[in-house]
Image: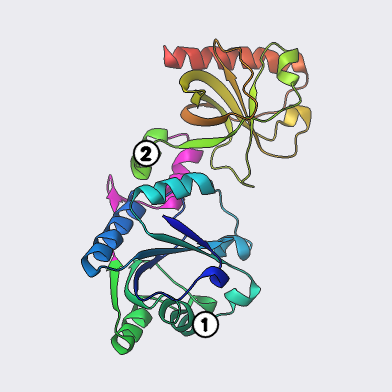
């Protein structure tokens, strides 16, 4: 899958099939939609193009949401579904003022020469969200492109959606969240140097910076960690570490039976069970006592 970063890097296509959206998490509803797009791409002999935005329109307008996957994870999930192109449009003040009709003409027709468009049942676009399925159908009749509306995918009688998955994760219901995602929820990143405070209380941790401003999970969890080609059990804290007056969200993992230097190593943390919410302790001794309890709870879970 080729990534096109920005409209300035988009050359005119001889034809394409297109879908548009944030695709946060690339859950089972997204997967169903993209598989249909790839199917149509092959039938028409045209490249498939997925359009997303950076930042998301929600973030641009001040409605920040917890991202279910970072860019690398999202790219891997999309690429595995067989897409040809991922067009990432910079969502700024100028773009936010583009009308729905201008978006159709300037990007979908003039640049992508779109012949088929697949959208979700709640999709809106253009300034003031005036564009929808009906408008695309009307323009399609005039410009000669087909529009298809993909209906919601249900999971246990519930509509698969990124917002529902965020809610399930915040509740610690990983079983239901993973079922709706179609894979196991995880957070990936590179191990970074920390302040090594954990070593002072005999709980050395590996530290993974979280680039997203809001995390879909916060607190203490039993986790499994993929690192250096192996899987280790452990307990993690993800949050701002109020006991040490932390300001940024950090993922700290204490791995059982592990004593290796792994700075710079790529790692994936898979969340298994919510143990407790993050809290501020009056002293390091109190924190140490609680970590002992959390560690035992996690070990009991794995046993």
Q: Give the numbered dot on residue 236.
A: none
Residue 287: percent from left, percent from top: 70, 18
Quadrant of the frame with the C terminus? top left
Residue depicted at x 52% and y 23%: 228
Asked if residue 69 can be seen in this view, the reply is no
| Left or right: 119, with 157 as reference point | right
Asked if disc 2 and disc 1 are in contact, CB closer than 8 Å, the reply is: no
Residue 95: percent from left, percent from top: 59, 75
Residue depicted at x 72% and y 27%: 194
Q: Is residue 203 above or below residue 138?
A: above
Q: Is residue 161 magenta?
A: yes
Q: Is residue 232 above or below residue 274?
A: above
Region rendered in magenta: 150-173
Residue 161: percent from left, percent from top: 40, 53
Asked if residue 46 can be seen in this view, the reply is yes
For the image, the number of numbered tags is 2
Identify the image's colour scheme: rainbow, by chain, secondary structure or one colour: rainbow
| Left or right: 116, with 224 as reference point | left
Q: Give the numbered dot on residue 183.
A: 2
Q: Earlier in the sequence, mark 2 or mark 1?
A: 1
| Left or right: 11, with 179 as reference point | right
Question: Toward which corner of the image does residue 294 lie, by quadrant?
Answer: top right
| Left or right: 82, with 44 as reference point | right
Q: Is residue 99 above or below residue 286?
A: below
Q: Choose between 251 and 276: the one closer to the eye.
A: 251
Q: Name the residue beneath numbered marker 1.
A: 99
Q: Choose between 84 and 277: the one closer to the eye.
A: 84
Graded by Cα atoms within 10 Å as few (under 14), some (14 to 19) or many (20 or more), the crowding at tag 1 reads some
Q: Is residue 101 above or below residue 195?
A: below
């Amino acid at each position: 899958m080729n990534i096109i970063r920005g409209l300035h890097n988009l050359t005119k296509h001889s034809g394409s099939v297109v879908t548009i959206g944030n695709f946060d998490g690339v859950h089972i509803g997204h997967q169903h939609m993209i598989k249909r797009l790839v199917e149509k791409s092959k039938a028409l002999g045209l490249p498939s193009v997925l359009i997303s935005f950076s930042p998301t329109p929600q973030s641009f307008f001040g409605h920040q949401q917890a991202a279910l996957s970072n860019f690398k994870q999202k790219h891997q999930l999309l690429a595995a579904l067989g897409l040809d192109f991922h067009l990432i449009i910079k969502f700024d003040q100028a773009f936010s003022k583009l009308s729905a009709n201008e978006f159709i003409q300037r990007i979908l027709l003039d640049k992508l020469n779109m012949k088929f468009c697949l959208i979700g049942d709640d999709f809106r676009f253009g300034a003031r969200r005036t564009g929808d399925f009906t408008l695309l159908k009307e323009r399609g009749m005039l410009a000669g492109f087909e529009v298809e509306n993909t209906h919601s995918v249900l999971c246990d009688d519930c509509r698969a959606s990124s917002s529902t998955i965020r809610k399930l994760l915040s509740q610690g219901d990983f079983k239901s969240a993973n079922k709706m995602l179609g894979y196991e929820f995880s957070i990936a990143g590179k191990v970074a140097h920390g302040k090594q405070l954990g070593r002072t209380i005999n709980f050395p941790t590996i530290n993974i910076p979280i680039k997203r401003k809001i995390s879909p999970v916060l607190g203490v969890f039993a986790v499994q960690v993929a690192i250096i080609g192996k899987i280790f059990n452990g307990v993690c804290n993800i949050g701002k570490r109020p006991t040490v007056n932390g300001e940024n969200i950090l993922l700290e993992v204490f791995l059982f039976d592990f004593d290796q230097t792994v700075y710079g190593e790529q790692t994936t943390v898979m969340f298994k069970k919510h143990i407790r919410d993050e809290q501020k302790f009056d002293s390091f001794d109190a924190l140490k006592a609680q970590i002992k309890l959390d560690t035992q709870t996690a070990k009991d879970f794995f046993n």
